[in-house]
Structures are given as structure tokens and as C-alpha cells.
Image (cartoon, rainbow, N blue to C red):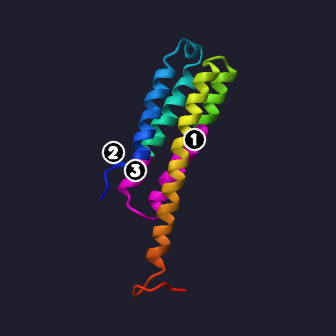
Amino acid sequence: MSFFEDLKVWQKAKDLSVRVHKITRLRGFDEDPELKENLRRASIDAACLIADGSVRGTGGSSIASYLDARGLLARLDTLAELSLALGCVEEKSRDVLRQESETVAKMLSGLIKAQRNQGRKNKGSVDGSEAY
């Protein structure tokens, strides 16, 4: 079993969550505590889903967790954009969140691809030879 702490994608997601917490401490979020909570929840849940997927091994359930995490990163991007539009953050902070989120999403895409390829490799071989 692999431990999620060893995954670079989980480490980046954790760092992103810490960054989100620091940014949402800014005064601009005092007016919109729900937006603040949604940003925090999306970042926390993304990191947790990566950890969850890593302990599920390889296969459909782990891929589903990684896909859900990627969806939460898209939500985070949307919330960061709304935060800028509502005046809660400056453009620089929004850009940092979106850049870090994109990095994690790309890493997740690579992990998903690798998991799918591993699944195909395992299904395609009955006696050590390819099925096609």
C-alpha cells in the first residue's frame, strides 16, 4: 500500500489548502464568510480525495476519487474568480490560487492516465501476452 504523504500531488494539494487558508484570512472575506468557507472546503476536500484515492489502490474507485478531486479544483478556480469579482482578493492572490490549482490538476491528470494505463495493462494480459 502506498501512503498518500509520499505523493507529490497530495503534497501540492496540501500546500494549496494552506495557501487558501492564509488568503481567506484577509479582511475582504469578512463580508462573505460563505465564500471563505467554500474556498476552504474545496481545497481541503481536494487534498482528502487524493489521499482517499491513494489508499484505494489502482482501479476505478481510486480514479473516481482523483476525478472528484479534479472537479473540486475547478470549483476552487471558480470561487477564486468570484472572490476577485466581489473584491475579496486582489488579482495577484487569485492568480496564485489558480496557478497552484492548475498545477495540482495537471498532476492529477497524469496520475489518472497512469492508473488507467495500468488497469488496461492488467486486463489485457492473461498469460503474460497482450490480448490483441
Is 88 within the magenta? no
Query: 17 and 129: which one is in front?
Result: 129
From the top left corner, tell me how far across and down residue 55 is, in percent: 35, 55
Q: What element carries label 3?
A: helix
> Who comes first in sequence, dot 1 or dot 3?
3
Q: Mark 1 points at which residue?
A: 102
For marks 1 and 3, give the one nearer the viewer: 1
> Closer to the camera, 106 or 89?
106
- Looking at the image, tell me whether mark 2 or mark 3 is earlier in sequence order: 2
Q: Residue at x 61, y 35 (%)?
A: 77
Quarter of the image where the C terminus is located: bottom right
Q: Position of residue 107 (x, y in %)?
A: 50, 49
Q: How crowded is mark 1: few (under 14 residues within 10 Å), some or many (20 or more)?
A: some
Residue 33 sits above or below residue 69 on the image = above
Highlighted range, magenta:
50-75
Q: Which tag, 2 or 1, sits closer to the chain's start?
A: 2
Q: Are marks 2 and 3 in contact (CB under 8 Å)?
A: no
Residue at 31% across, 51% down: 3
In the picture, the disc for residue 52 is 3
Cα separation between marks 1 and 3: 20 Å
* Disc number lying in front (2 or 3): 2
Task: Residue under label 2, please give it.
Answer: 5
Mark 2 and mark 3: span between their CA atoms?
A: 11 Å
- Badge 1 amino acid: Glu
Q: In this view, does 81 lie above or below 108?
A: above
Q: Residue at x 40, y 50 (%)?
A: 52
Residue type marked 3: Asp
| Prevailing secondary structure of the magenta residues | helix
